[in-house]
Image (tube, coloured by chain):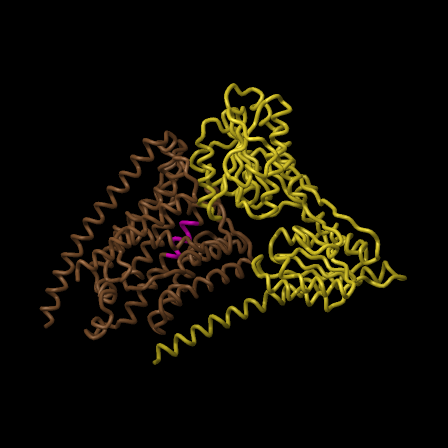
Amino acid sequence: MGTNNNKTNAAKRGIFTSAGATQKIVVILVIVALAVFFSVMSKPFRQYATLVSIFDYSYYISFMAIGVTFALITGGVDLSIGTGMITCGLVGGYVIAHKAMPVGVGILVALVIGLLFGLINAMTVAVMELPPFIATLCSMMLARGIGSILTGALSVTWPPAGSEQGWVRSFFKYKTEGGLLIPVGFLLVIIAVIVMSLILNHTRPGRYIIAIGSNKEATRLSGIKVRKYQGLAYLICGLFTGIAGIAYSCTFQAVAPGSGAGLELDAIAGAIIGGTSMNGGYGTITGTLLGVYVMSLLKTGLPYIGLQSNWQQIVTGIILIIAVLVDVLKNTKGK
Amino acid sequence: MKKKLLSYILCAALVGVLFAGCGKKEESATEETTETTETTTEETTETTTDTEVLNIEIVSKGFQHQYWQAVLKGAQQKAEELGVKINFVGPNSESDIADQVQMLNSAINAKPAAIALAALDTSACLDAITTAQAAGIPIIGFDSGVPDAPEGAVLANASTDNYAAGELAAEEGYKAGIGDRVKNATGTVRIGVLSQDATSESIINRGLGFIDKMAELVTADGKTVTVEGNDKFVSDSKVEKTSGADVVIEVLVPAQVTSELSSIDCQTLLNKSDLIAVYGSNQHSGEAMVTGDENLGKFGIGDDKILGIAFDSGAVIKQAVKDQKFIGAITQAPVAMGEVTVELCVKAAKGEAVSDVDTGCQWYTSETMDNPEIAQNLYD
């Protein structure tokens, strides 16, 4: 019985990875096509500064997306990451700017707050078994309120680049002595992608998380502590919310309380475009990253061809529908 | 079961912490106000002997914001000077409309000599306003006041004339370099306006004031001008749409108020080769200008640079003005607003005639920003 199960699982995995690989190739082609299209249509797009901007605006979405992929794979979702990210940035920045703490402490605080939200979600979703949609919607409201209260509804600025405390910004964008800006944050994203891919695909907890998403009951019956691993997915998501909060605060000048709602959708969209299944049970971190770059390219590129941000939202909506449709078709084919 | 219990305990702890946090804040707020009240009462007993001490309730939009701290400071100064007692309150954030209504009701119940109000939502306050009218308590509006209040309900307003503030930005910007560039230009030049939204009255007026004044100045120099971009601004400005104009004023409004979209809007402007200046009409837009320029480095004062004009302050904008990245910015005068508000309240309480007062705004540059007159109105 055991061996039989393993075999079918392996066979399934084979089908999925090949389907996943096709989707990834399609997404890569879309990225290339978009880049070529924007470059042909707009001269200013063909400059180094644009590339740096695309990277700038992709970091925080990338980190959120990596985290939320885990929640999506369990068959759930985490809607609190957008406001949660802002809260992490706010509180982290608050202790630096208003409590005169070193930046290191601010980073730590941001990560802890992220983990805390992860813990709350893990408790409500995995232990109390609330529907993830509602549970994380609630923690989203918690996040927004807590961020405003802790900072006294004031917007917070992390130390600017070039200042003594501003070293953390150069982890994302490094300015050489010649004044050249290097988007080194991309390396951080790549490292995160490699590490999290390994954890998802080659460790026991990772495989369990996938198993929960494909069939929670069967996973439970085979003796796996479902609650523990489902909770772990949300913890990971929380940790990455904290990292995203740091990335966001280092990219933008100020973090404003009460903002952040809606940003989670960019990350979720990235994951889905990258092939993560809305029904759970399947997803890859590399796919997610590719999906995020489709989103960032659109966001940065469309204004260059004269389309205002209203259009970008329409285009994103259409692309998402297509991505979800592909997911649905893939599943019905499997049946 | 054990885990369930644990999770319940955790949740309870979280809620507990929340309550503790809220409680503390309120405590400190009341402490602060009682402190001020105490000092003012002491002063009054010394200075006024024959008149009764007037009580004034001030209901602001949000007590915690730095801007409001400056308003409070002005109000306290004036209260001390005039020997009246003030109670300054405000909700936790600018979206807590119900809280503010409750505060307004408590203020009315305190039977003050006058109430100053900066309503978050006029329609939510209507009942309370009628009650105050029936009780014969005069209401003075401040900051954004009480827009669309019933006729005669609000006796006077102490507020920034946002349209005039926008005009000042255009005038000073024109003097500081835009004018020379417009006059010396051989082809079309472009002036960008970044607006956070096209719905808030104060933001719209700041934009329109800038556009109309800029158009007036450009036309006075014998050049033609047109407005492009956001429909609201194009149709509401006084500028006639002309093709092939010498100066194009382009207004960009993001689909959603996020730092990212506003920064990208700024980049879009900066990448246009005919751009000479950008005006960001509030703190959000000003900060987006800094982010948007980060990779391009186009703002500055040199001949090959683009002129940046911001609004309000905050650490980022102050720094950008100080570094001469921006040629200057407009700041409102919250301290003066606090003073005028109390003054109007006292007059109204005594039955004297009152009328609207523009509390003014100031243009500040790297040179003038340390001037105490201006520095008191700048906040981090």
Question: Which secondary structure class fits the magenta region best?
Answer: helix
Quarter assignment of residue A133: bottom left
Give the chain ID for the yellow colour. Answer: B
Left or right: residue B303 versus residue B3 is right
Residue A214: x percent and y percent? 22, 65
Residue B379: x percent and y percent? 61, 47
Determine the residue positioned at 48% across, 26% down.
B274
Give the chain ID for the brown colour. Answer: A
Left or right: residue B77 versus residue A135 is right
Magenta range is A241-248
Q: Quadrant of the N terminus of chain A?
A: bottom left
- Judge whether residue B373 can be spotted in this image: yes
Is A309 covered by the magenta stretch?
no
Q: Quick one: B192 or A182, which is closer to the camera?
A: B192
Determine the residue positioned at 67% across, 61% down.
B126
Determine the residue positioned at 36% across, 71% down.
A130
